[in-house]
Structures are given as C-alpha cells and as structure tokens.
Image (cartoon, rainbow, N blue to C red):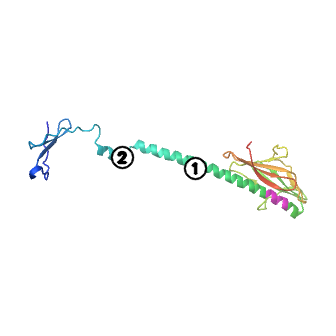
Amino acid sequence: MVARGRRRPGWRGAGGRYRQLACGVSTRGEICCASRSRRWPVLAPVPRAPGRPLGQRWQRGFTLLEILIVVALIAMLAGAASLTLGNAGRDERLHAEAKHVAALLGLATEEAVLRGRPLAVRPTDAGFEFLELRSEGWRVIERDPLLRPRHYSDGTRVTFLDPAGAPRRAGRDPGVVFAPNGLGAPLLVTLQHPAVAQAWRVRADAAGRLEVEAAERF
C-alpha cells in the first residue's frame, strides 16, 4: 500500500512539459516514488536505514552516564596533578627549612662570640631550642625573636645526630655547645617529612662551617 504524496512543482522535463511525481511511504516504512508520465521509469523503493533516523541520532546529545564518565576522568587527572604539585611544594619547603636551620645555627655561633658566653642547641620532642649559660645555669632562650624555640606541627621531623650518626635524645643536657671563641662540637641535623621522599641534612664542623645537603630518610 503506497500513500500518494504531493506534486513537486517546477520540475520541467524534455520539451518544457511538467512531469509529476507521486511519492509516499509504504506500510513497511519504504519511500516509493513514481512518475505519471509514461516516459519516466518508475523509481525503485528506497529502503529506510535500520535504527534511529540519522538526524535524531546526531541530535540526541550525551547521556548522563557519558557525562559522569567524563567528569570522573577530569577529577582523576586534576587530583593526580594536584598531588604531584603538592609533593613538589613540600620538598621545596623542607629544603628551605633546612637552610633556615643552618642559618640559625650560624647565628648561635656568632651570638656566643658577641655575648661572650656559651650558647647551646638541643633537640625537643617537636623540634629544637637554644640555651644560654647564665649564672644560675643553662636557660632556654624564649624571648629572642630569632633564637626562640622551634616547634613543627606539620609532620616535619627534626633529628640531631652525633658525629657517629646516632640520634641525640631530647633531655635536660645542654646538647651541642657553641663556645665564645667561635668553636663548637661537630653537629648533624636531619629534616624529613612523611610525604617527601627526600630528606635534608645540615652539617656543621668544629669551626662553625655549615653545609646543607640531601640525605636519605631513616
């Protein structure tokens, strides 16, 4: 069964005569066209492509599942980039803090000479502190803006080592002493952080020369 369609005006054939087409859609979904002129052959049925029409397939857009997958991939890539940049930033901050510790040790050596009395540094449970020898004994320097006690709450671990490499424990002894003549005992201070693979070490010799170097975690 073929439903008759509309004429297509303005279609001229040979001799200027109009040729009329009758088009329609069969019950099976096929498009059929035929000419009313005997000189025009009947066109074969044009089969419809299976599935959705082409226009509808291109116009349907993205599904919710596809959008969620894209969002998840973007979040994963952003998280990986953030983690990489975060670790790099921690390593730079740890290196900078090692340089800061070296500067403080150098300052303590100079202050012992300027004050004419021994100074010392010793480890604590959360960092380290400087001490000054007074008439009543060793006292922690608390009010000095530079030599005040240092405490780390971000996970940074500071370890004082003796020349043999053994850790020095926090205690009541003065620790490493800086003499008024500018000399002191050799000292090793290691800084490390759980999220940073590289540790940093401050090395001081008896003459007060300081050096910051990379070290292995322990």
- What number is the disc on residue 82? 1
Q: Residue 195 placed where, x, y %?
A: 66, 46
Vertical comparison of 170 with 137: above or below? above
The residue under the point 83% across, 50% down is 187
Is residue 35 highlighted in magenta? no
Q: Which residue type does callout 1 highlight?
A: Ser
In the drawing, does residue 118 fall left or right of residue 54? Answer: right
Is residue 109 highlighted in magenta? yes
Earlier in the chain: of badge 2 and badge 1, it is 2
Quadrant (top left/top right/bottom left/bottom right) for the N terminus: top left
In the drawing, does residue 67 fall left or right of residue 154? Answer: left
Q: Residue 159 placed where, x, y %?
A: 77, 47
Q: Residue 103 placed where, x, y %?
A: 78, 58
The residue under the point 57% across, 49% down is 82
- What number is the disc on residue 125? none
Instruction: Say what secondary structure mark 1 lies in.
Output: helix
Residue indicated by mark 2: 61
The residue under the point 79% across, 49% down is 189
Can residue 112 be spotted in the picture? yes
Using the image as rendered, state which of residue 104 and residue 13 is in the foreground: 13
